[in-house]
């Protein structure tokens, strides 16, 4: 189930609210300038669909976003570098472009740092999340990852994270907590 858990910076152990209703998630994130949607594929997809088939199933929705490029990125529990991939995303960072991710399968936890609050956004299959350029955040794929995501972007440089140097990500709950 998708949700948003809102934590004051001063209390990383206890959220002051958890939102599970789609409309509540959308409105809470919209107030931050973050976009959250649910997409359905234009065509039926087989469980083992490849990159071209997955992109084609969502191409019209991707095109409507207005970004120049889309590719597929996935990590599963049998990925030989799953620990290293997880560690790479578990540090607070930001991007020079909007951070656009569509979860085609599985799940992940995007955690946004906005002023004196942290917003943990659990995304699952069919969720689209657009984090504005420059917003500090981190991403947890979990100890036994399973996610397939479409990355939508303008330039390859926009996929390169700028690490903030903050250790904030270490004190807030992760996907498996």
Image (cartoon, rainbow, N blue to C red):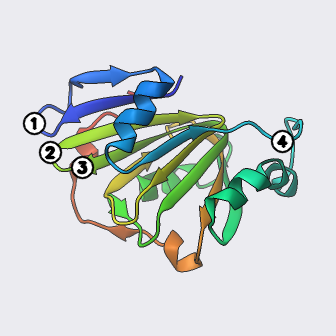
User: The C terminus lies in which quarter of the figure?
Assistant: top left
Q: How would you rate the neighbour count of disc 2 (Cα within 10 Å): few for under 14, some for 14-19, many for 20 or more? A: few
Q: Nearer the viewer, mark 2 or mark 1?
A: 2
32 on left or right of 41: left
Question: Which mark is drawn over residue 114?
Answer: 3
> Foreground residue, 121 or 63?
63
In this view, the mark in front (4 or 2): 4
Secondary structure type for disc 1: loop
Of the image marks 4 and 2, the number of the one nearer the N terminus:
4
Considering only order in the chain, which callout, 1 or 3, is on the residue closer to the N terminus? Answer: 1
Residue at mark 4 to residue at mark 1: CA–CA distance: 44 Å
Can you give x and y, in whole percent of width and height, for residue 62 in the image? 69, 56
Residue 116, disc:
2
Image depth: mark 4 or mark 1 in front: 4
Determine the residue positioned at 41% across, 67% down: 95
Sequence-wise, the earlier of marks 3 and 4 is 4
Classify mark 1: residues with Cα within 10 Å, few (<14), some (14-19) or many (20+): few
Query: Callout 4 environment at 10 Å: few (<14), some (14 to 19), or many (20+)?
Result: few
In which quadrant of the rendered image does the N terminus lie? top right
Q: Quadrant of residue 15?
A: top left
Q: Are marks 2 and 1 in contact (CB under 8 Å)?
A: yes
Residue most extreme to the left: 10
- Disc 3 vs disc 1: Cβ atoms closer than 8 Å? no
Residue at image mark 1: 10
- Please name the residue shown 38% across and 40% down the image: 29
Percent position (x, y) of residue 144?
Answer: 57, 36
Q: CA distance from mark 2 to mark 1?
A: 8 Å
Q: Which residue is mark 4?
A: 42
Alpha carbons under labels 2 and 3: distance apart: 6 Å
* 161 horizontally vs 70: left or right: left
């Amino acid at each position: 189930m998708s949700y948003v858990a809102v934590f004051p910076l001063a209390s990383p152990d206890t959220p002051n609210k958890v939102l599970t209703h789609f409309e509540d998630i959308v409105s809470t994130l919209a107030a931050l300038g973050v976009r959250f949607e649910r997409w359905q594929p234009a065509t039926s997809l087989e469980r083992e669909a490849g990159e071209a088939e997955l992109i084609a199933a969502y191409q019209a929705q991707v095109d409507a976003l207005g970004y120049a490029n889309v590719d597929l990125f996935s990590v599963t529990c049998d990925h030989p570098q799953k620990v290293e991939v997880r560690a790479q995303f578990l540090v607070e960072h930001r991007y020079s472009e909007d951070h656009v991710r569509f979860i085609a399968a599985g799940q992940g936890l995007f955690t946004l740092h906005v002023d004196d609050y942290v917003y943990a956004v659990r995304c699952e299959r069919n969720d689209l999340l657009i984090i504005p350029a420059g917003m500090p955040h981190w991403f947890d794929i979990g100890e036994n990852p399973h996610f397939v995501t479409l990355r939508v972007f303008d330039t390859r440089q926009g996929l390169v994270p700028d690490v903030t140097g903050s250790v904030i990500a270490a004190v807030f709950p992760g996907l498996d907590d």
